[in-house]
Amino acid sequence: MKKLYTFLEQLEEAGIFFTLQRIRESIMVNVVVPGERWEVEFFEDGHVVVERFLTAGDLLDEKALNSLFDKFAE
């Protein structure tokens, strides 16, 4: 848990927005910075997994919502 607390302190000191979520057997820190999002998972055994999502910078208008729902709705 020390890694998690240290990471949270670093985010707070840097003024970076984040939320916490419990996923499976981990605590996930969702981080949002301009142009990207991070999912950082801290597991009880001490290992950490980081997934980073980047944007190409393309902005779409509201017409894109229909195609996104068509693609991802069950």
Image (tube, rainbow, N blue to C red):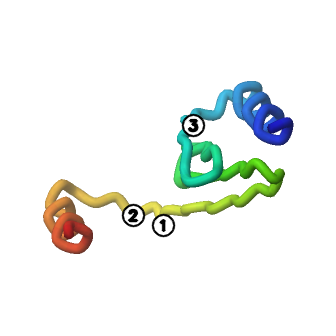
Residue at 55% x, 62% y is 53
Label of residue 68 in the image: none
In the image, what residue type sits under mark 1? Answer: Ala
Q: Quadrant of residue 19?
A: top right
Label 3: how many residues lie within 10 Å, few (<14), some (14-19) or many (20+)?
some
Left or right: 35 as drawn, with respect to 73: right
Q: Is residue 44 above or below residue 5?
A: below
Give the mark nearer the N terminus: 2 vs 3: 3
Quickly name the residue at label 1.
56
Dot 2 crowding, Cα within 10 Å, few <14, some 14–19, many 20+: few
Labels 1 & 3 near each other (Cβ < 8 A): no
Circle 2 SS class: loop
Disc 2 vs disc 3: which is toward the camera?
3
Identified by mark 3, the residue type is Leu
Q: Residue 34: x, y in percent? A: 55, 46
Q: Which quadrant is home to the N terminus?
A: top right
Query: Quick check: 7 above or below 41?
Result: above
Q: Which residue is mark 3?
A: 20
Horizontally, is 25 left or right of 23 in the view?
A: right
For residue 58, the mark is 2
Q: Of 42 and 38, which appears nearest the observer?
A: 42
As helix, strand or loop, the secondary structure at mark 1 comes to: loop
Amino acid at dot 2: Asp
